[in-house]
Image (spheres, grey):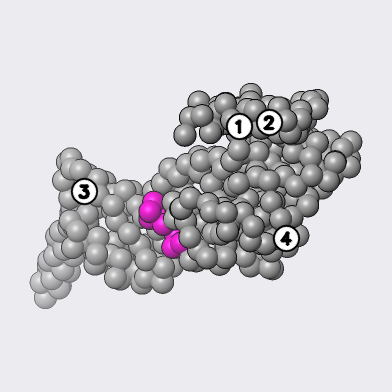
Amino acid sequence: MKFFSEFKWIILLYLLFILSWFAYNKWQDTMKPVARSGSAIVFEVPKGSSFKSIAKELEDDGLIRSKEALYILAWYKKELASIKAGEYKLSPAMTPEEILETLVTGKVIRHLITIPEGYNMFQIARLLERGGVVKKQAFLKVCTDWDFLRKSGIQEDSAEGYLFPESYYLSKNSSPREIAQTFINQFWKIWKDNHFNKRLKEINSSVHEVVTLASIVELEAAVPEEKPIIASVFWNRLKRGIPLQADPTVKYGVLIEKKIKKRRLTWKDLRKSTPYNTYTLHGLPKGPIANPGLDSLRAVLYPKKTDYLYFVSKGNGRHYFSKTLKEHNRAVERYIKSHR
């Protein structure tokens, strides 16, 4: 009897060993990549997704062998609630452990978005929406959020002028607030790195005045070397109380009031009083009309010393600068009226 009892335990141990061996091999098999090679696909994890729904989607897309195995792996690593929302580039050649690590560490796809110098916040919003990063209206709402602006160091009613034009890598899961903050943080970094606050005291001006004037210079100048000269023209006019008469400010006023993106200015537009129309205003407009780059900011802070009060386009991207109205009218006759 003792022999049969011992034999029974041997059989049970043997069966347990066999089952363990099969379970181990099965586990090892589920932890292998689905394929040795394969093209990566974009896999999106929406905000608020449950782990089970993500695992099922991964299995359905042929990226893992078993959703149950991935769940067990995440449970063992205590990462069931650690997956971050966003877009990921995943391949069937990745192991489930590699996929889980990618999702947990938030190695999301980053989209390269380049903001050109001189874009206004409406153009930037459309650019971001076309790039699939954020909805246009959601971004614009943040750019006029009083609380957000104050926390970002902006004492005005809009982020216009402070969304620094540069190339950025942005992820789709970033909120409109995070994206706007990225642009504004870059503006303040550029401002600080170039010690512009020190220069402000020397010229007795404010950040808002400089950014506003720089945004006009940005849209008036086509070549970088003319920016300090154009800035000097505007400073000279401001000192003498002469209206700036800058067409881009009129266009921005039309855009704000009527939401018209593009059309030729009319005499009616030039005469219409808006907070941005520098034909009817004496001094600077209400605020920036675009987002200036570093060259335009520096040009306004360090303008060239000139006596110029006027300039007119030559039609080749450059301008003719004049000291008197008589000289300016001759230049207009030469470069504009004769050309027409």
Q: Hey, what amino acid is under mark 4?
A: Glu
Pointer 4 with pointer 2, Cβ within 8 A:
no
Residue 329 visible, this orientation:
yes
Q: Residues within 10 Å of mark 2 (few under 14, many from 20)?
A: some
Q: Residue at x 66, y 35 (%)?
A: 296
The reply to whether callout 4 and callout 1 are in contact (CB within 8 Å) is no
- Which corner quadrant holds the N terminus? bottom left
Per the rendering, the mark at residue 92 is: 3
- Amino acid at the residue labelled 2: His
Residue visible at 79% across and 44% down?
242
Q: Nearer the viewer, mark 4 or mark 1?
A: 1
Which SS class for mark 1? helix
**Picture residue at 48% right of the left edge, 60% below the top:** 260
Spatial CA span between label 3 and label 2:
69 Å
CA–CA distance in space, label 4 to label 1 = 37 Å
The image quarter in which residue 133 lies: bottom left
Q: Is residue 167 left or right of residue 102?
A: right
Contact check, label 1 and label 2, Cβ < 8 Å = yes
Which mark identifies residue 156?
4
Q: Secondary structure at mark 2?
A: helix
Q: Earlier in the sequence, mark 3 or mark 2?
A: 3
As drawn, 162 above or below 226? below
